[in-house]
Amino acid sequence: MSGGAVHEDEPEPETGDLRFGDEGEVEEFDGTRWTVHRGLPGDDAGSAMREDPETDPMTRPPGSD
């Protein structure tokens, strides 16, 4: 990722490159211009990245009984 400012010594962006825009949003280069990247999770709860014993039931691997 690169910053939002364009510098003369920076290489030309390639399709799919990501950067932080001036307002802090993530932008993706679509081949012609920078657009807001929508592929990031929102503010919803989403899915857990790990089991949390406080909220998730314990699961054991098969054959560990």
Image (cartoon, rainbow, N blue to C red):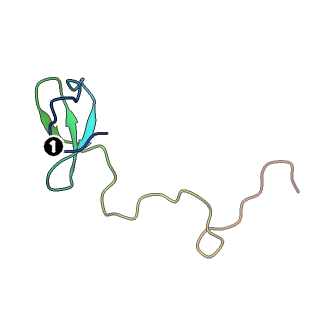
Q: Secondary structure at mark 1?
A: loop
The residue furthest bottom is: 54
Measured along the vertical axis of the image, is residue 30 above or below residue 35? above
User: Which kind of residue does numbered mark 1 sit on?
Assistant: Ala
User: Residue 32 lies in what quarter of the image?
Assistant: top left
Which residue is at the front of the view, 1 or 55? 1
Quarter-wise, where is residue 17 in the image? top left
Residue 19 screen position, x and y as percent: 25, 41
Q: Which residue corresponds to the image point at 71% horizontal and 65% vertical from the top-left?
A: 58
Q: Quadrant of the C terminus?
A: bottom right
Q: Residue 60: horizontal and vertical position, in percent?
A: 77, 57
Where residue 11 appears, as percent x and y from the top left, is 23, 25
Location of the N terminus by quadrant is: top left
Depth check, front residue: 58 or 40: 40
Residue 10: x, y in percent? 22, 30
Disc 1 marks which residue?
A: 5
Count of numbered labels shown in the rendering: 1
For the point 62% across and 62% down, the residue is: 51
Q: Nearer the viewer, residue 2 or 15?
A: 2
Tell me the crowding category of disc 1: few under 14, some 14 to 19, or many 20 or more residues within 10 angstroms, Cα based.
Answer: few
Left or right position of 46 against 65: left
Residue 40 placement, left or right of 11 = right
Considering every residue shown, the one lying at the far left of the view is 33
